[in-house]
Image (cartoon, rainbow, N blue to C red):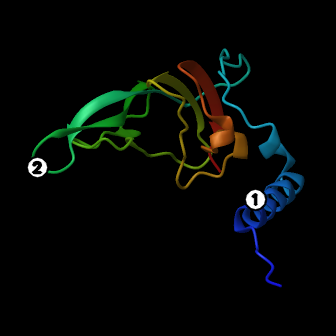
Amino acid sequence: MINKINYNRRNFLQHSALGVTALSMFPKLALAKTNSLKSKPTASFKADVEIEITSRDADMPIKQGRKTKVQKYYAKLLKDPKGTVVELEDNYLGPTLNYKQGQKVRIYYKNRLSEPSVIHWHGLHIPQHSDGHPMYAIKRGLFIREYKIF
């Protein structure tokens, strides 16, 4: 007698068990959703630097030839010091932001993309909810974040 193994059923059960295990270990993943963060500046937070970052769809040449639809990030320094924002010309990546230890920074982020977005900060020690995890994707609109640079 030959037993036939139903690989579809086996794969389904293995993947289901893996998913249940992952959700039990990381319960916030079960509640993940995109949300629209809207807030007002905190009155007691006295920012040394204020920057407006806007993301929007753009068409740019990645290689020679046709343009490619990309998500481009633009930055504008609202409050000094100068040299804090360095735009990368002919590049769809975000600008370089230069901070000094101890500065208080307020970011006004305007998502003008056709879909939710996240911003990931390389080199900053900031709370997880502010560092670009897909769980905290931002719908179209404006949100404000305030940080103290350590």
Residue lying farthest front?
Answer: 1
Question: What amino acid type is highlighted by mark number 2?
Answer: Gln
Residue lying furthest bottom: 1
Q: Which residue is mark 1?
A: 12
Residue 41, image x and y in percent? 65, 18
Q: CA distance from mark 2 to mark 1?
A: 44 Å
**Mark in front: 2 vs 1:** 1
Depth check: give the residue in front, 72 or 20.
20
What amino acid does circle 1 point to?
Answer: Phe
- Which numbered disc, 2 or 1, marks the residue that appears first in the sequence? 1
Q: Residue at x 76, y 73 (%)?
A: 5
Residue 127, image x, y percentages: 72, 45
Looking at the picture, how far across and down is residue 109, in whole percent?
Answer: 52, 26
Q: Residues at badges 2 and 1 in contact (C-beta under 8 Å)?
A: no
Which one is in front, 113 or 3? 3
Picture quadrant of residue 22: bottom right
Q: Is residue 81 above or below residue 54?
A: below
Q: Quadrant of residue 43?
A: top right
